[in-house]
Protein backbone atom coordinates (compact mmCIF):
# COMPACT_ATOMS: atom_id res chain seq x y z
CA UNK A 1 0.00 0.00 0.00
CA UNK A 2 1.14 3.54 -0.76
CA UNK A 3 -1.01 5.29 1.85
CA UNK A 4 0.46 7.16 4.77
CA UNK A 5 -2.33 5.83 6.99
CA UNK A 6 -1.00 4.26 10.18
CA UNK A 7 -4.65 3.86 11.14
CA UNK A 8 -6.43 1.19 13.16
CA UNK A 9 -8.87 0.33 10.37
CA UNK A 10 -8.29 -2.94 8.54
CA UNK A 11 -8.59 -1.57 5.01
CA UNK A 12 -9.20 -3.69 1.94
CA UNK A 13 -8.03 -2.61 -1.52
CA UNK A 14 -10.59 -1.52 -4.09
CA UNK A 15 -11.81 -4.50 -6.08
CA UNK A 16 -14.62 -6.95 -6.62
CA UNK A 17 -13.51 -9.10 -3.68
CA UNK A 18 -14.37 -6.34 -1.19
CA UNK A 19 -17.86 -5.94 -2.66
CA UNK A 20 -18.38 -9.71 -2.64
CA UNK A 21 -17.45 -9.78 1.06
CA UNK A 22 -19.96 -6.98 1.71
CA UNK A 23 -22.66 -8.89 -0.18
CA UNK A 24 -22.09 -12.12 1.75
CA UNK A 25 -21.98 -10.29 5.08
CA UNK A 26 -24.95 -8.06 4.32
CA UNK A 27 -22.95 -4.94 5.12
CA UNK A 28 -22.42 -1.64 3.33
CA UNK A 29 -18.99 -0.59 2.09
CA UNK A 30 -17.18 2.40 3.58
CA UNK A 31 -14.86 3.70 0.86
CA UNK A 32 -12.15 6.17 1.84
CA UNK A 33 -10.86 8.05 -1.22
CA UNK A 34 -7.51 9.62 -0.49
CA UNK A 35 -4.35 10.88 -2.19
CA UNK A 36 -0.66 10.98 -1.21
CA UNK A 37 -0.61 14.79 -1.48
CA UNK A 38 -3.72 15.39 0.63
CA UNK A 39 -3.12 17.10 3.98
CA UNK A 40 -6.73 16.68 5.16
CA UNK A 41 -6.54 12.98 4.31
CA UNK A 42 -3.61 12.60 6.65
CA UNK A 43 -5.46 14.60 9.29
CA UNK A 44 -8.49 12.31 9.06
CA UNK A 45 -6.21 9.29 9.38
CA UNK A 46 -4.69 10.72 12.56
CA UNK A 47 -7.90 12.00 14.15
CA UNK A 48 -10.69 9.71 12.96
CA UNK A 49 -9.39 6.42 11.62
CA UNK A 50 -6.92 6.09 14.50
CA UNK A 51 -9.69 6.28 17.11
CA UNK A 52 -9.98 2.73 18.56
CA UNK A 53 -13.75 2.82 19.10
CA UNK A 54 -14.44 4.24 15.64
CA UNK A 55 -12.12 1.71 14.02
CA UNK A 56 -13.90 -1.12 15.83
CA UNK A 57 -17.29 0.29 14.84
CA UNK A 58 -16.24 0.50 11.19
CA UNK A 59 -14.85 -3.03 11.19
CA UNK A 60 -17.97 -4.47 12.80
CA UNK A 61 -20.64 -2.79 10.67
CA UNK A 62 -18.95 -2.00 7.35
CA UNK A 63 -16.46 -3.35 4.83
CA UNK A 64 -13.77 -0.63 4.76
CA UNK A 65 -12.04 0.02 1.43
CA UNK A 66 -9.15 2.39 0.78
CA UNK A 67 -8.62 4.00 -2.64
CA UNK A 68 -5.71 6.11 -3.88
CA UNK A 69 -7.49 8.41 -6.34
CA UNK A 70 -4.32 9.24 -8.28
CA UNK A 71 -3.88 5.56 -9.08
CA UNK A 72 -7.60 4.90 -9.57
CA UNK A 73 -8.97 7.89 -11.48
CA UNK A 74 -12.14 6.11 -12.64
CA UNK A 75 -13.09 5.50 -8.99
CA UNK A 76 -12.40 9.16 -8.27
CA UNK A 77 -14.65 10.37 -11.09
CA UNK A 78 -17.56 8.19 -9.99
CA UNK A 79 -17.42 8.64 -6.23
CA UNK A 80 -15.79 12.00 -5.45
CA UNK A 81 -18.05 13.86 -3.00
CA UNK A 82 -16.51 17.27 -3.65
CA UNK A 83 -12.95 16.96 -2.40
CA UNK A 84 -10.50 14.74 -0.58
CA UNK A 85 -10.65 12.86 1.59
CA UNK A 86 -13.97 11.58 0.31
CA UNK A 87 -15.88 9.32 2.70
CA UNK A 88 -18.57 7.49 0.74
CA UNK A 89 -20.87 4.68 1.86
CA UNK A 90 -21.89 2.16 -0.80
CA UNK A 91 -24.16 -0.82 -1.25
CA UNK A 92 -22.55 -4.15 -2.21
CA UNK A 93 -23.53 -3.26 -5.79
CA UNK A 94 -21.56 -0.02 -5.59
CA UNK A 95 -24.53 2.35 -5.40
CA UNK A 96 -24.16 5.40 -3.17
CA UNK A 97 -25.87 5.53 0.24
CA UNK A 98 -24.37 8.86 1.30
CA UNK A 99 -21.03 10.61 1.36
CA UNK A 100 -19.00 13.55 2.58
CA UNK A 101 -15.45 14.83 2.59
CA UNK A 102 -13.46 15.17 5.83
CA UNK A 103 -15.27 13.87 8.92
CA UNK A 104 -14.01 14.61 12.42
CA UNK A 105 -14.42 11.83 15.01
CA UNK A 106 -17.65 13.11 16.57
CA UNK A 107 -19.22 13.74 13.18
CA UNK A 108 -18.12 10.32 11.95
CA UNK A 109 -19.86 8.64 14.92
CA UNK A 110 -23.13 10.25 13.97
CA UNK A 111 -22.72 9.41 10.28
CA UNK A 112 -21.94 5.76 11.04
CA UNK A 113 -25.06 5.48 13.19
CA UNK A 114 -27.21 7.17 10.55
CA UNK A 115 -25.95 4.98 7.71
CA UNK A 116 -26.38 1.83 9.77
CA UNK A 117 -29.97 2.79 10.63
CA UNK A 118 -30.78 3.54 7.00
CA UNK A 119 -29.17 0.30 5.88
CA UNK A 120 -31.05 -1.76 8.45
CA UNK A 121 -34.33 -0.14 7.43
CA UNK A 122 -33.99 -0.09 3.64
CA UNK A 123 -30.99 -2.21 2.66
CA UNK A 124 -29.87 -1.86 -0.95
CA UNK A 125 -32.99 0.18 -1.75
CA UNK A 126 -31.31 3.11 0.01
CA UNK A 127 -28.63 3.25 -2.70
CA UNK A 128 -28.63 5.55 -5.69
CA UNK A 129 -26.58 6.04 -8.82
CA UNK A 130 -24.87 9.44 -9.28
CA UNK A 131 -26.49 11.59 -11.93
CA UNK A 132 -23.43 11.67 -14.17
CA UNK A 133 -23.77 7.88 -14.48
CA UNK A 134 -27.53 7.44 -14.47
CA UNK A 135 -27.98 10.11 -17.17
CA UNK A 136 -24.81 9.40 -19.09
CA UNK A 137 -25.84 10.30 -22.64
CA UNK A 138 -25.02 13.99 -23.21
CA UNK A 139 -27.29 16.04 -25.49
CA UNK A 140 -25.67 16.31 -28.89
CA UNK A 141 -25.75 19.26 -31.26
CA UNK A 142 -23.76 21.12 -33.87
CA UNK A 143 -20.36 22.66 -33.23
CA UNK A 144 -21.00 26.31 -34.06
CA UNK A 145 -19.63 29.75 -33.24
CA UNK A 146 -22.35 30.07 -30.59
CA UNK A 147 -20.39 27.83 -28.22
CA UNK A 148 -17.39 30.16 -28.16
CA UNK A 149 -19.65 33.24 -27.90
CA UNK A 150 -21.51 31.75 -24.93
CA UNK A 151 -18.23 31.09 -23.12
CA UNK A 152 -17.03 34.64 -23.75
CA UNK A 153 -20.19 35.82 -21.98
CA UNK A 154 -19.58 33.41 -19.10
CA UNK A 155 -15.99 34.61 -18.68
CA UNK A 156 -17.30 38.15 -18.22
CA UNK A 157 -20.32 37.27 -16.10
CA UNK A 158 -18.49 35.00 -13.64
CA UNK A 159 -15.42 37.19 -13.22
CA UNK A 160 -14.58 38.51 -9.77
CA UNK A 161 -13.90 42.20 -10.46
CA UNK A 162 -12.53 42.80 -6.98
CA UNK A 163 -10.04 39.96 -6.59
CA UNK A 164 -9.63 38.45 -10.04
CA UNK A 165 -10.40 34.91 -11.06
CA UNK A 166 -13.83 33.38 -11.45
CA UNK A 167 -16.52 32.65 -8.89
CA UNK A 168 -17.48 34.09 -5.53
CA UNK A 169 -16.04 31.42 -3.24
CA UNK A 170 -12.74 29.54 -3.08
CA UNK A 171 -10.50 30.19 -6.06
CA UNK A 172 -9.05 27.58 -8.37
CA UNK A 173 -6.66 29.03 -10.96
CA UNK A 174 -8.46 27.42 -13.97
CA UNK A 175 -5.52 27.59 -16.39
CA UNK A 176 -7.57 26.52 -19.44
CA UNK A 177 -10.02 29.33 -18.69
CA UNK A 178 -7.12 31.78 -18.44
CA UNK A 179 -5.85 30.65 -21.85
CA UNK A 180 -9.31 30.95 -23.39
CA UNK A 181 -9.61 34.47 -22.01
CA UNK A 182 -6.10 35.54 -23.06
CA UNK A 183 -7.21 35.27 -26.67
CA UNK A 184 -10.69 36.73 -26.15
CA UNK A 185 -10.81 38.80 -22.93
CA UNK A 186 -7.22 39.69 -22.15
CA UNK A 187 -7.77 42.12 -19.28
CA UNK A 188 -9.63 39.55 -17.17
CA UNK A 189 -7.07 36.90 -18.05
CA UNK A 190 -4.07 39.00 -17.04
CA UNK A 191 -5.75 40.11 -13.81
CA UNK A 192 -6.19 36.43 -12.96
CA UNK A 193 -2.57 35.65 -13.82
CA UNK A 194 -1.52 38.42 -11.42
CA UNK A 195 -3.70 36.97 -8.66
CA UNK A 196 -2.30 33.46 -9.19
CA UNK A 197 1.27 34.76 -9.29
CA UNK A 198 0.76 36.75 -6.10
CA UNK A 199 -1.14 34.21 -4.01
CA UNK A 200 -0.49 30.66 -5.28
CA UNK A 201 3.17 30.79 -6.30
CA UNK A 202 5.71 29.37 -3.87
CA UNK A 203 8.37 32.05 -4.20
CA UNK A 204 11.01 30.00 -2.40
CA UNK A 205 10.80 26.39 -3.61
CA UNK A 206 8.94 27.25 -6.80
CA UNK A 207 5.78 25.76 -8.24
CA UNK A 208 2.15 26.59 -7.56
CA UNK A 209 -0.18 25.59 -4.76
CA UNK A 210 -3.37 23.87 -5.80
CA UNK A 211 -6.07 26.41 -4.88
CA UNK A 212 -7.15 29.07 -2.39
CA UNK A 213 -9.98 28.46 0.04
CA UNK A 214 -11.26 32.03 0.16
CA UNK A 215 -12.53 34.46 -2.44
CA UNK A 216 -9.55 36.82 -1.98
CA UNK A 217 -7.09 34.00 -2.75
CA UNK A 218 -6.27 33.50 0.94
CA UNK A 219 -5.84 30.21 2.86
CA UNK A 220 -4.08 28.30 0.07
CA UNK A 221 -4.12 24.52 -0.02
CA UNK A 222 -0.42 23.95 -0.50
CA UNK A 223 -0.25 20.62 -2.26
CA UNK A 224 1.55 20.82 -5.60
CA UNK A 225 0.38 18.52 -8.40
CA UNK A 226 2.38 17.97 -11.56
CA UNK A 227 -0.63 18.35 -13.86
CA UNK A 228 -1.87 21.56 -12.27
CA UNK A 229 1.62 23.06 -12.32
CA UNK A 230 1.86 22.09 -15.98
CA UNK A 231 -1.41 23.86 -16.71
CA UNK A 232 -0.14 27.05 -15.08
CA UNK A 233 3.20 26.89 -16.91
CA UNK A 234 1.15 26.83 -20.10
CA UNK A 235 -1.07 29.69 -18.95
CA UNK A 236 1.83 31.96 -17.98
CA UNK A 237 3.68 31.03 -21.18
CA UNK A 238 0.58 31.96 -23.16
CA UNK A 239 0.37 35.22 -21.22
CA UNK A 240 3.95 35.97 -22.19
CA UNK A 241 3.25 35.04 -25.83
CA UNK A 242 0.43 37.61 -26.05
CA UNK A 243 1.83 40.41 -23.90
CA UNK A 244 5.62 40.09 -23.87
CA UNK A 245 5.54 40.75 -20.10
CA UNK A 246 8.79 39.51 -18.55
CA UNK A 247 7.00 38.81 -15.26
CA UNK A 248 4.96 36.07 -16.95
CA UNK A 249 8.04 34.48 -18.50
CA UNK A 250 9.85 34.58 -15.15
CA UNK A 251 6.91 33.03 -13.31
CA UNK A 252 6.63 30.23 -15.85
CA UNK A 253 10.38 29.63 -15.67
CA UNK A 254 10.31 29.29 -11.89
CA UNK A 255 7.61 26.64 -12.22
CA UNK A 256 9.64 24.88 -14.93
CA UNK A 257 12.60 24.86 -12.53
CA UNK A 258 10.39 23.34 -9.81
CA UNK A 259 9.11 20.61 -12.11
CA UNK A 260 12.60 19.74 -13.37
CA UNK A 261 14.15 19.61 -9.89
CA UNK A 262 11.69 18.85 -7.08
CA UNK A 263 9.43 16.64 -9.23
CA UNK A 264 12.09 15.09 -11.45
CA UNK A 265 12.63 11.39 -10.67
CA UNK A 266 15.71 11.01 -12.86
CA UNK A 267 13.62 9.52 -15.67
CA UNK A 268 10.38 11.46 -15.79
CA UNK A 269 8.11 13.65 -13.65
CA UNK A 270 6.73 12.63 -10.26
CA UNK A 271 3.01 12.87 -9.62
CA UNK A 272 2.83 15.35 -6.74
CA UNK A 273 4.29 16.90 -3.63
CA UNK A 274 2.27 16.84 -0.42
CA UNK A 275 0.94 19.85 1.44
CA UNK A 276 2.59 20.82 4.72
CA UNK A 277 1.57 24.18 6.13
CA UNK A 278 4.26 24.10 8.81
CA UNK A 279 6.97 23.76 6.18
CA UNK A 280 5.57 26.18 3.62
CA UNK A 281 5.01 28.96 6.16
CA UNK A 282 8.62 28.83 7.44
CA UNK A 283 11.01 31.59 6.52
CA UNK A 284 13.60 30.63 3.88
CA UNK A 285 16.44 29.98 6.32
CA UNK A 286 14.32 27.59 8.39
CA UNK A 287 13.10 25.82 5.27
CA UNK A 288 16.71 25.25 4.32
CA UNK A 289 17.17 23.16 7.45
CA UNK A 290 13.81 21.34 7.31
CA UNK A 291 12.81 18.23 5.40
CA UNK A 292 10.56 19.15 2.46
CA UNK A 293 7.12 17.55 2.12
CA UNK A 294 6.76 14.07 0.69
CA UNK A 295 7.01 13.65 -3.10
CA UNK A 296 5.05 10.81 -4.69
CA UNK A 297 7.53 9.66 -7.33
CA UNK A 298 4.99 7.63 -9.29
CA UNK A 299 5.27 8.40 -13.01
CA UNK A 300 1.75 8.80 -14.40
CA UNK A 301 1.27 8.82 -18.15
CA UNK A 302 -1.28 11.65 -18.19
CA UNK A 303 0.68 13.98 -15.93
CA UNK A 304 3.90 13.43 -17.84
CA UNK A 305 2.12 14.19 -21.10
CA UNK A 306 0.83 17.45 -19.64
CA UNK A 307 4.19 18.49 -18.19
CA UNK A 308 5.98 17.68 -21.47
CA UNK A 309 3.44 19.74 -23.42
CA UNK A 310 3.86 22.68 -21.01
CA UNK A 311 7.66 22.60 -21.05
CA UNK A 312 7.79 22.38 -24.83
CA UNK A 313 5.32 25.26 -25.14
CA UNK A 314 7.57 27.31 -22.86
CA UNK A 315 10.68 26.37 -24.83
CA UNK A 316 8.92 27.30 -28.09
CA UNK A 317 8.70 30.96 -27.11
CA UNK A 318 11.85 31.27 -24.96
CA UNK A 319 14.43 28.87 -26.50
CA UNK A 320 14.85 27.28 -23.06
CA UNK A 321 16.92 24.23 -24.02
CA UNK A 322 16.66 22.58 -20.61
CA UNK A 323 12.87 22.52 -20.78
CA UNK A 324 13.03 20.75 -24.13
CA UNK A 325 15.50 18.14 -22.90
CA UNK A 326 13.45 17.26 -19.83
CA UNK A 327 10.25 17.06 -21.86
CA UNK A 328 11.83 14.76 -24.44
CA UNK A 329 13.32 12.49 -21.78
CA UNK A 330 9.98 12.19 -20.00
CA UNK A 331 8.13 11.37 -23.23
CA UNK A 332 10.73 8.79 -24.19
CA UNK A 333 10.52 7.16 -20.75
CA UNK A 334 6.71 6.97 -20.86
CA UNK A 335 6.76 5.56 -24.40
CA UNK A 336 9.33 2.95 -23.35
CA UNK A 337 7.67 1.85 -20.10
CA UNK A 338 3.94 2.60 -20.30
CA UNK A 339 2.97 2.28 -23.97
CA UNK A 340 2.65 -0.91 -26.03
CA UNK A 341 1.31 -0.66 -29.58
CA UNK A 342 -0.56 2.51 -28.73
CA UNK A 343 -2.14 1.12 -25.53
CA UNK A 344 -1.22 3.26 -22.52
CA UNK A 345 -0.87 2.14 -18.90
CA UNK A 346 -1.67 4.72 -16.24
CA UNK A 347 1.54 3.96 -14.30
CA UNK A 348 4.11 1.21 -14.07
CA UNK A 349 2.56 -1.41 -11.79
CA UNK A 350 0.77 -4.73 -12.10
CA UNK A 351 -2.51 -3.27 -10.90
CA UNK A 352 -2.40 -0.20 -13.14
CA UNK A 353 -5.43 0.53 -15.27
CA UNK A 354 -4.86 0.47 -19.02
CA UNK A 355 -6.36 2.50 -21.82
CA UNK A 356 -7.69 5.45 -19.83
CA UNK A 357 -8.90 8.37 -21.92
CA UNK A 358 -6.95 10.89 -19.82
CA UNK A 359 -3.68 9.03 -20.41
CA UNK A 360 -4.25 8.80 -24.16
CA UNK A 361 -5.43 12.41 -24.52
CA UNK A 362 -2.72 14.07 -22.46
CA UNK A 363 0.13 11.94 -23.73
CA UNK A 364 -1.09 12.62 -27.27
CA UNK A 365 -1.03 16.34 -26.47
CA UNK A 366 2.58 16.06 -25.33
CA UNK A 367 3.58 14.15 -28.47
CA UNK A 368 1.87 16.53 -30.91
CA UNK A 369 3.50 19.49 -29.16
CA UNK A 370 6.89 17.78 -29.40
CA UNK A 371 6.30 17.21 -33.13
CA UNK A 372 5.61 20.92 -33.57
CA UNK A 373 8.51 22.20 -31.48
CA UNK A 374 11.31 19.70 -32.20
CA UNK A 375 10.10 18.10 -35.44
CA UNK A 376 7.92 15.06 -36.19
CA UNK A 377 10.66 12.39 -36.17
CA UNK A 378 10.15 10.03 -33.25
CA UNK A 379 6.91 11.65 -32.13
CA UNK A 380 4.39 11.51 -34.95
CA UNK A 381 4.25 7.73 -35.31
CA UNK A 382 3.58 6.98 -31.62
CA UNK A 383 1.07 9.84 -31.61
CA UNK A 384 -0.84 8.12 -34.42
CA UNK A 385 -0.75 4.78 -32.61
CA UNK A 386 -2.00 6.26 -29.33
CA UNK A 387 -4.77 8.19 -31.08
CA UNK A 388 -5.84 5.20 -33.15
CA UNK A 389 -5.95 2.94 -30.10
CA UNK A 390 -8.16 5.42 -28.22
CA UNK A 391 -10.47 5.80 -31.21
CA UNK A 392 -10.76 2.04 -31.62
CA UNK A 393 -11.41 1.28 -27.94
CA UNK A 394 -13.07 4.30 -26.35
CA UNK A 395 -15.41 5.95 -28.87
CA UNK A 396 -19.03 5.32 -27.84
CA UNK A 397 -22.06 4.98 -30.10
CA UNK A 398 -22.81 8.70 -29.71
CA UNK A 399 -19.24 9.56 -30.89
CA UNK A 400 -18.07 10.79 -27.47
CA UNK A 401 -15.09 9.14 -25.77
CA UNK A 402 -15.57 7.01 -22.66
CA UNK A 403 -13.15 7.53 -19.78
CA UNK A 404 -12.02 3.91 -20.03
CA UNK A 405 -13.24 0.38 -20.58
CA UNK A 406 -16.52 0.19 -18.58
CA UNK A 407 -15.61 -2.83 -16.48
CA UNK A 408 -14.71 -3.31 -12.83
CA UNK A 409 -16.03 -3.26 -9.29
CA UNK A 410 -18.77 -0.98 -8.04
CA UNK A 411 -20.01 1.44 -10.67
CA UNK A 412 -16.91 1.13 -12.84
CA UNK A 413 -18.99 -0.95 -15.25
CA UNK A 414 -21.10 2.10 -16.04
CA UNK A 415 -19.85 4.28 -18.91
CA UNK A 416 -18.71 7.81 -18.16
CA UNK A 417 -18.16 10.51 -20.77
CA UNK A 418 -16.04 13.25 -19.16
CA UNK A 419 -16.53 16.56 -20.97
CA UNK A 420 -13.17 18.12 -20.19
CA UNK A 421 -11.17 15.04 -21.15
CA UNK A 422 -13.17 14.67 -24.37
CA UNK A 423 -12.19 18.27 -25.14
CA UNK A 424 -8.53 17.50 -24.41
CA UNK A 425 -8.61 14.50 -26.73
CA UNK A 426 -10.36 16.50 -29.45
CA UNK A 427 -7.79 19.30 -29.08
CA UNK A 428 -4.89 16.88 -29.51
CA UNK A 429 -6.60 15.19 -32.47
CA UNK A 430 -6.94 18.57 -34.20
CA UNK A 431 -3.18 19.05 -33.83
CA UNK A 432 -2.64 15.54 -35.19
CA UNK A 433 -4.94 16.31 -38.14
CA UNK A 434 -2.68 19.16 -39.19
CA UNK A 435 0.58 17.33 -38.49
CA UNK A 436 -0.37 14.02 -40.14
CA UNK A 437 -2.59 15.45 -42.88
CA UNK A 438 -5.38 12.97 -42.14
CA UNK A 439 -8.93 14.35 -42.14
CA UNK A 440 -10.23 11.45 -40.04
CA UNK A 441 -8.65 12.98 -36.94
CA UNK A 442 -10.48 16.27 -37.41
CA UNK A 443 -13.72 14.39 -38.10
CA UNK A 444 -13.35 12.31 -34.93
CA UNK A 445 -12.55 15.44 -32.90
CA UNK A 446 -15.56 17.32 -34.24
CA UNK A 447 -17.88 14.37 -33.66
CA UNK A 448 -16.71 14.06 -30.04
CA UNK A 449 -17.30 17.77 -29.43
CA UNK A 450 -20.71 17.62 -31.11
CA UNK A 451 -21.77 14.86 -28.69
CA UNK A 452 -21.95 17.53 -25.95
CA UNK A 453 -22.89 20.57 -28.00
CA UNK A 454 -26.59 20.42 -27.18
CA UNK A 455 -25.78 21.47 -23.61
CA UNK A 456 -23.37 24.31 -24.40
CA UNK A 457 -25.71 27.00 -23.06
CA UNK A 458 -25.54 25.40 -19.59
CA UNK A 459 -21.75 25.30 -19.43
CA UNK A 460 -19.73 27.51 -17.10
CA UNK A 461 -16.20 28.89 -17.14
CA UNK A 462 -14.76 25.70 -15.64
CA UNK A 463 -15.02 24.05 -19.08
CA UNK A 464 -13.73 26.92 -21.20
CA UNK A 465 -11.27 24.47 -22.76
CA UNK A 466 -14.24 22.77 -24.43
CA UNK A 467 -15.35 26.06 -26.00
CA UNK A 468 -11.80 26.81 -27.18
CA UNK A 469 -11.56 23.43 -28.88
CA UNK A 470 -14.99 23.89 -30.47
CA UNK A 471 -13.74 27.18 -31.93
CA UNK A 472 -10.70 25.41 -33.37
CA UNK A 473 -12.89 22.72 -34.92
CA UNK A 474 -15.46 25.20 -36.27
CA UNK A 475 -13.06 27.66 -37.85
CA UNK A 476 -10.04 25.36 -38.28
CA UNK A 477 -6.94 26.50 -36.39
CA UNK A 478 -4.28 28.66 -37.94
CA UNK A 479 -1.79 26.20 -39.51
CA UNK A 480 1.76 27.32 -40.27
CA UNK A 481 3.87 25.10 -42.52
CA UNK A 482 7.58 25.79 -42.11
CA UNK A 483 11.05 24.52 -42.92
CA UNK A 484 12.56 21.99 -40.48
CA UNK A 485 12.54 22.58 -36.73
CA UNK A 486 15.20 24.97 -35.51
CA UNK A 487 15.26 27.19 -38.58
CA UNK A 488 14.53 30.91 -38.29
CA UNK A 489 11.17 30.53 -40.03
CA UNK A 490 10.18 27.67 -37.75
CA UNK A 491 11.14 29.60 -34.62
CA UNK A 492 9.20 32.62 -35.89
CA UNK A 493 6.13 30.45 -36.47
CA UNK A 494 6.23 29.20 -32.89
CA UNK A 495 6.14 32.82 -31.71
CA UNK A 496 3.07 33.87 -33.67
CA UNK A 497 0.69 35.27 -31.05
CA UNK A 498 -1.99 32.61 -31.36
CA UNK A 499 -1.60 29.77 -28.87
CA UNK A 500 -4.28 27.71 -30.68
CA UNK A 501 -2.27 27.49 -33.92
CA UNK A 502 -0.53 24.37 -35.24
CA UNK A 503 3.05 24.58 -36.53
CA UNK A 504 3.98 21.88 -39.04
CA UNK A 505 7.74 21.68 -39.69
CA UNK A 506 8.67 19.89 -42.90
CA UNK A 507 11.07 19.64 -45.80
CA UNK A 508 10.59 23.01 -47.46
CA UNK A 509 12.52 26.27 -47.78
CA UNK A 510 9.74 28.79 -47.21
CA UNK A 511 6.73 29.05 -44.89
CA UNK A 512 3.02 29.46 -45.53
CA UNK A 513 0.03 30.26 -43.37
CA UNK A 514 -3.14 28.21 -43.90
CA UNK A 515 -6.58 29.34 -42.73
CA UNK A 516 -9.67 27.25 -43.46
CA UNK A 517 -7.82 25.43 -46.23
CA UNK A 518 -6.62 28.63 -47.95
CA UNK A 519 -2.88 29.09 -48.18
CA UNK A 520 -1.01 32.39 -48.01
CA UNK A 521 1.73 33.47 -50.36
CA UNK A 522 5.09 31.98 -49.34
CA UNK A 523 7.19 33.77 -46.73
CA UNK A 524 10.96 33.64 -46.95
CA UNK A 525 11.85 35.66 -43.85
CA UNK A 526 10.48 35.76 -40.29
CA UNK A 527 9.12 39.27 -40.84
CA UNK A 528 7.27 38.16 -43.96
CA UNK A 529 5.82 35.20 -42.05
CA UNK A 530 4.51 37.44 -39.29
CA UNK A 531 2.91 39.65 -41.94
CA UNK A 532 1.26 36.62 -43.56
CA UNK A 533 -0.08 35.50 -40.19
CA UNK A 534 -1.54 38.95 -39.58
CA UNK A 535 -2.97 39.34 -43.09
CA UNK A 536 -4.45 35.89 -43.62
CA UNK A 537 -4.38 33.73 -46.76
CA UNK A 538 -3.67 35.07 -50.22
CA UNK A 539 -6.73 36.06 -52.27
Image: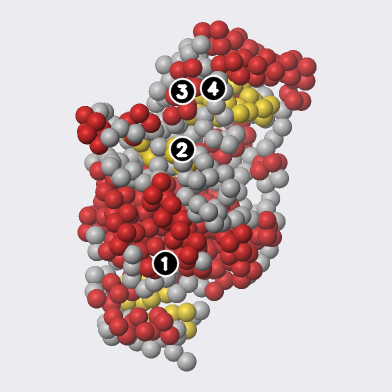
How far across and down, in percent of the image, does residue 466 sit? 55, 59
Q: Which residue is mark 2?
A: 219
Is residue 309 in view? no
Q: Residue at x 34, y 34 (%)?
A: 281
Image quadrant holding the N terminus, namely: top left
Q: Which residue is mark 4?
A: 65
Asked whether 79 or 92 is in front, the reply is 79
Q: Secondary structure at mark 2?
A: loop
Query: Nearer the viewer's eye, disc 3 or disc 1?
Result: 3
Residue 60 tag number:
none
Q: Earlier in the sequence, mark 4 or mark 2?
A: 4
Q: Which residue is mark 3?
A: 43
Asked whether 267 or 459 is in front, the reply is 459
Asked whether 55 or 161 is in front, the reply is 161
How many residues crowd mark 1 within 10 Å: few (<14), some (14–19), many (20+)?
many
Q: Secondary structure at mark 3?
A: helix
Dot 2 and dot 3 residues touching (CB under 8 Å) = no
Q: Which residue is mark 1?
A: 499
Query: Nearer the viewer's eye, disc 4 or disc 3?
Result: 3
How far across and down, in percent of the image, does residue 407 sit? 58, 37
Q: Earlier in the sequence, mark 2 or mark 1?
A: 2
Q: Residue at x 40, y 80 (%)?
A: 533
Q: Earlier in the sequence, mark 1 or mark 4?
A: 4
How many residues crowd mark 3 within 10 Å: few (<14), some (14–19), many (20+)?
some
How many residues crowd mark 4 within 10 Å: few (<14), some (14–19), many (20+)?
many
Relative side of 345 to 144, left or right: left
- Disc 3 and disc 1: Cα gap in Å? 41 Å
- Disc 2 and disc 3: Cα gap in Å? 17 Å
Q: Is residue 8 above or below residue 379?
A: above
How far across and down, in percent of the image, does residue 444 sit? 55, 63
Q: Earlier in the sequence, mark 2 or mark 3?
A: 3
Amino acid sequence: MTFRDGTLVDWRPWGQEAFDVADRAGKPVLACLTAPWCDWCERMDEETYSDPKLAANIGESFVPVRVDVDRNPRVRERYNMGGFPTTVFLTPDGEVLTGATYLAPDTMRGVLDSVRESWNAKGTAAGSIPRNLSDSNPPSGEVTADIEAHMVEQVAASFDDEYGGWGSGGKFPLPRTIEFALKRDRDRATRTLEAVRTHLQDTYDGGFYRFAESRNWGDPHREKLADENAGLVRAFTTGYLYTGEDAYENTAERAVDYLTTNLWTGEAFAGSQAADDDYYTMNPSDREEADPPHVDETVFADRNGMVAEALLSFAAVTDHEGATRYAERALEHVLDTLVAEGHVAHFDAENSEMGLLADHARLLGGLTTAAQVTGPDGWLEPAREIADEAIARLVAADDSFLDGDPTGAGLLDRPLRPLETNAEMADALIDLWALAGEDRYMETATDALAAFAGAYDRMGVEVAGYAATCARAHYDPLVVRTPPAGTDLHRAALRIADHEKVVVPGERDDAVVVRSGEESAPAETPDELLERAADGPAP
